[in-house]
Image (cartoon, rainbow, N blue to C red):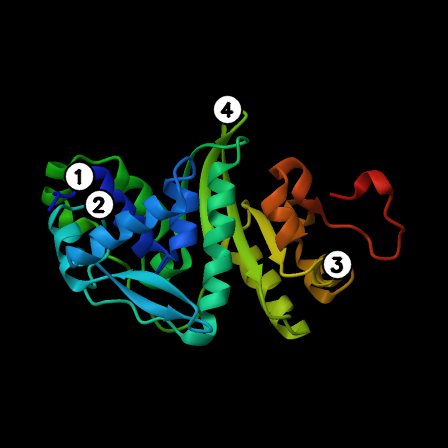
Amino acid sequence: MLELREEDFQKLLYIHSNRFMTPRLFHLKFMPNKTYFRALQLLNLYRKKEYVRFIEFRDFTNKAAILTRKALKEIHEKRLTILTNLNEVKVSFKAMEHHERVIHLRIALEKNPTFTDLLWVSDFEMACGIEPALKFKYRNLSVEERIVSDRKFRPKKTGKGYKKRIPDGYFEAIRNGLVEAYVFEYENSKYSFGQIKDVVVKLEKDYPTARKLIVSRTAENAARMNNAIWYFMHESKFAQRGGRPSLWFTTDYDHALSKTLETNFRKLRNPNQESKASDKP
């Protein structure tokens, strides 16, 4: 049986950073110029070598790959990740659709020609205590340096007191020659007004200078999200603290997948004013 190459371990690491990956998304990310069957063959190779196992997905008509303890142990020994928990991930059945769509949107952003050298930190990684700055530093070290500095690169345990909101993703990328930071949040099920307030208050506090990309499942929900964020930024008591509404952008799932960054996300718009046709994504 074929031995895995370094690029195979990078694929496995990508799967684990998202918790899991469906064959369809694996094909889209890593083998878009080859057949879907070829992508399935590669995933089945990983399964036969006991690096992944498949779990049932949603309505039991599809499946998703997660990494086994064997794979996680080997990846850790190769110093490819800061993650120290070598147990298989546990995926909430109810949350699988949300996670699948986040992975799809992540792939779309990573393929966006606007960006170069994009480095993503997933919500799963952040929930494990991996801060973006820690992951960025780790990436630039050699394997030897990672072994020597291993104790310096330990996930940060969550303390008591104020809890940061973990967005669905955070990434930094080079755009027009400049490094820019982005926070990403996906609304699959409609947020309550209180949940939207929590998103605004905490993302403003935790990521004040990053651009906030908010994607809703439908165009109707995206418009509602825009209106609520506009209210908090301009008319609520929170607005008196001073926020940066120019850094907030909204769109819906279909537009986020089908258009470029410049056309699929829209700046916050005053809900009391008519939108011009040219302002539509």
Q: Amino acid at mark 4?
A: Gly
Where is the C terminus found, in terms of image quarters? top right
What is the quadrant of residue 93 in the picture? bottom left
Query: Which of the numbered marks, if any, corresponds to residue 9?
Result: 2
Horizontal relation, residue 229 to residue 79: left or right: right
Amino acid at the residue labelled 1 = Arg
The residue tagged 4 is 177
Give the answer, above or below, for where 197 lies relative to 31: below
Q: Nearer the viewer, mark 3 or mark 4?
A: 3
Measured from the top left, where is residue 137 in percent x and y? 28, 40
Mark 2, residues whose alpha carbon is within 10 Å: few (<14), some, or many (≥20)? Answer: some
Looking at the rendered image, the disc whose residue lies closer to the viewer, 1 or 4, is 1
Front: mark 1 or 3: 1
Please name which of the two marks, 2 or 4, marks the residue nearer to the observer: 2
Q: Secondary structure at mark 4?
A: loop
Whether residue 280 appears in this view of the structure is yes
Residue 115 vertical placement versus 85 (above, below):
above
Q: Give the number of the disc on residue 5.
A: 1
The residue under label 3 is which amino acid type? Ala
Q: Earlier in the sequence, mark 2 or mark 3?
A: 2
Q: Earlier in the sequence, mark 2 or mark 4?
A: 2
Q: Please say if the residues under marks 1 and 2 sit with CB atoms less than 8 Å apart.
A: yes
Q: Position of residue 51 (x, y in %)?
A: 19, 56
Q: Name the residue carrying label 3.
A: 223
